[in-house]
Amino acid sequence: MTKIAIFVDIQNIYYTTKDMFNRQFNYRKLWELASTQGEIVTANAYAIHRVDDKQHKFQTALKHIGFEVKLKPYIQRADGTAKGDWDVGITIDVMETAEKVDKIILLSGDGDFDMLLKRISEKHGVKTEVYGVKTLTSNTLIQAATKFNAIDDSFLL
């Protein structure tokens, strides 16, 4: 059976689906689809920790589906800007998991992950799938993936 690992850049998926469709991504639908393709052995969702009931309910729902939710503190800088980026954490986890699975599914449109997908595909022979909003997903990321899945109405709540 195909072993699958899923990695979700929550901030990226939240903002791109909100900007393009003004709707939320259906993580349960993704889980159900991935489950038909093999055994999900790892499923990580990366988010920014904020003290907010809505966020807590969302994170609880993700855990109920089967995701491990990894949180990083929300940092508000003195100039009013905020920091909350999981790119390095996602990259480390993907690299450590790639040799143990047959397929990596990445939910993100961030082009910073293109080199990562190329590397794990070359080094470990793992297939890579990306889910992202097509017009807001980096072309280099789309090209680096074995398969690109455009998020459309069928993946939205």
Image (cartoon, rainbow, N blue to C red):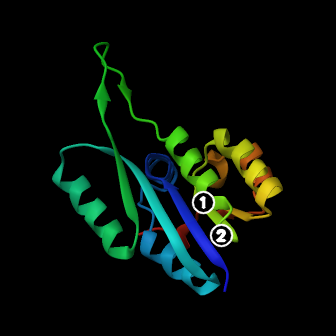
Of 53 and 66, which appears nearest the observer? 66
Which residue in the structure is indicated by mark 2?
Answer: 101
Residue at position x 66%, y 44% from top? 113
Q: Position of residue 87 (x, y in %)?
A: 54, 40
What secondary structure is found at the residue carrying circle 1?
helix
* Residue 138 visible to an observer of this rendering: no
Quarter holding the C terminus is bottom left
Determine whether, in the image, residue 107 is placed left or right of residue 135. Answer: left
**Quarter assignment of residue 4:** bottom right
- Mark 2, other Cα within 10 Å: few <14 / some 14–19 / many ≥20: some
- Mark 1, other Cα within 10 Å: few <14 / some 14–19 / many ≥20: some
What secondary structure is found at the residue carrying circle 2?
loop
Residue at position x 54%, y 39% from top? 88
Q: Is residue 102 above or below residue 46?
A: below
Q: Amino acid at mark 1?
A: Thr
C-beta proximity under 8 Å, tags 2 and 1:
yes
Which residue in the structure is indicated by mark 1?
Answer: 97
Of 56 and 120, which appears nearest the observer? 120
